[in-house]
Image (spheres, rainbow, N blue to C red):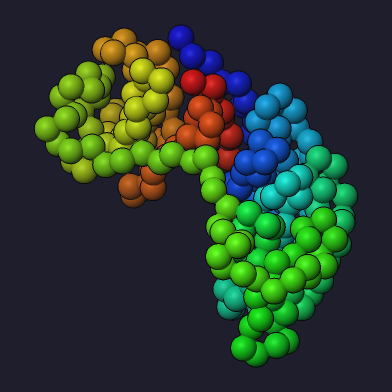
């Protein structure tokens, strides 16, 4: 049987997960809409150690995770509460949560193998530059042919064709078009929605051949179908339970 390598609960619902594949660190953004507070946490996917938990920035609500890269968590601010436009960057040390730098005129475009591609929002049209994520300094003009997009190590589930589902040996009858699966290391990971005990549930199963080696109830008493429930990163299965509990299994 499989058991979680990481099992960690948060006091607010998880809004976003981001992984720094260079240091195998997962960052968690949790939000409390009632109090309009956002929190950030960091956990090592190598050791399971909590680097920091539920830290806040000076801006308590209009900020969120942009990316994680080479031991740095990069956050963004929002231009306003009513607009989704990102403006301003804040860099935190991935292991201590210490503030490295902040610049309220910069914005993030994407990650490259050379680092983050950023631009000054005061300049139009935007001039893309590669930046030093630890200092916030712009290094040089962004060169698409040299600064290729950074590769990731993610694998996501696929929709299961109806004719495949009987071969999965599922213990429940899934709702139509709600089964997603991924095969890895002779294991089949399946998530689905089903009606059980009169309620709509989302469940996760891991099978080796026809043997069930792990199962979990992800959401219960839900009112609508939930999105895909898991991802795989370097042979680690990562998913949320009840929207506030992070679980990681090594497969």
**How far from the left and from the top, in percent, is residue 75?**
71, 60
Q: Quadrant of residue 9?
A: top right
Q: Taking 250 as reference, is 220 left or right?
A: left
| 149 up-or-down from 142: above or below | above
Q: Is residue 74 visible?
A: yes
Percent of width and height locating residue 205 = 36, 24
Camera-nearest residue between 118 and 216: 118
Is residue 61 depicted above or below 18 in this figure?
below
Q: Residue at x 60, y 62 (%)?
A: 146
Position of 192 relative to 216 (above/below): below
Which of the 4 image quadrants contains residue 244? top right
Q: Residue furthest front?
A: 146
Whole-percent x, y for residue 99 in the image: 87, 55
Answer left or right for 206 relative to 139: left
Q: Is residue 34 visible?
A: no
- Give the residue at x 85% y 61%: 135
Instruction: Name, please, the residue furthest toward the bottom.
Output: 124
Image height check: is 38 above or below 244? below
**Outermost residue to the left:** 163
Residue at the image position 79 percent from the left and 75 percent from the top: 104
Foreground residue among 119 and 218: 119
User: Quick one: 45 or 144, which is closer to the camera?
Assistant: 144
Q: How many marks?
A: 0
Q: Is residue 154 left or right of residue 60?
A: left
Give the residue at x 82% y 67%. 137
Q: Position of residue 250 (x, y in %)?
A: 54, 22
């Amino acid at each position: 049987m499989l058991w979680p390598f990481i099992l960690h609960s948060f006091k607010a619902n998880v809004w976003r997960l981001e992984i720094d594949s260079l240091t195998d660190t997962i960052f968690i953004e949790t939000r409390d809409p009632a109090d309009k507070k956002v929190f950030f946490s960091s956990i090592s996917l190598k050791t399971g150690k909590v680097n920091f938990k539920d830290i806040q920035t000076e801006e308590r609500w209009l900020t969120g995770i942009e990316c994680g890269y080479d031991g740095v968590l990069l956050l963004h601010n929002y231009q306003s509460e009513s607009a989704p436009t990102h403006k301003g960057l804040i860099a935190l040390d991935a292991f201590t949560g210490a503030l490295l730098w902040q610049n309220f005129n910069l914005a993030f475009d994407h990650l490259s193998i050379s680092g983050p591609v950023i631009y000054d929002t005061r300049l139009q049209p935007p001039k893309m530059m590669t930046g030093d994520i630890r200092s916030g300094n712009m290094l040089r003009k962004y060169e698409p042919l040299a600064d290729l997009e950074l590769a990731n190590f993610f694998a996501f589930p696929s929709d299961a064709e109806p004719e495949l589902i009987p071969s999965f040996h599922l213990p429940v009858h899934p709702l139509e078009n709600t089964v997603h699966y991924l095969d890895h290391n002779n294991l089949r990971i399946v998530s689905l929605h089903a009606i059980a005990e009169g309620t709509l549930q989302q469940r996760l199963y891991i099978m080796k051949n026809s043997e069930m080696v792990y199962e979990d109830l992800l959401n219960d008493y839900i009112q609508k179908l939930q999105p895909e429930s898991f991802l795989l990163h370097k042979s680690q299965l990562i998913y949320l339970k009840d929207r506030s509990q992070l679980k990681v299994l090594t497969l």
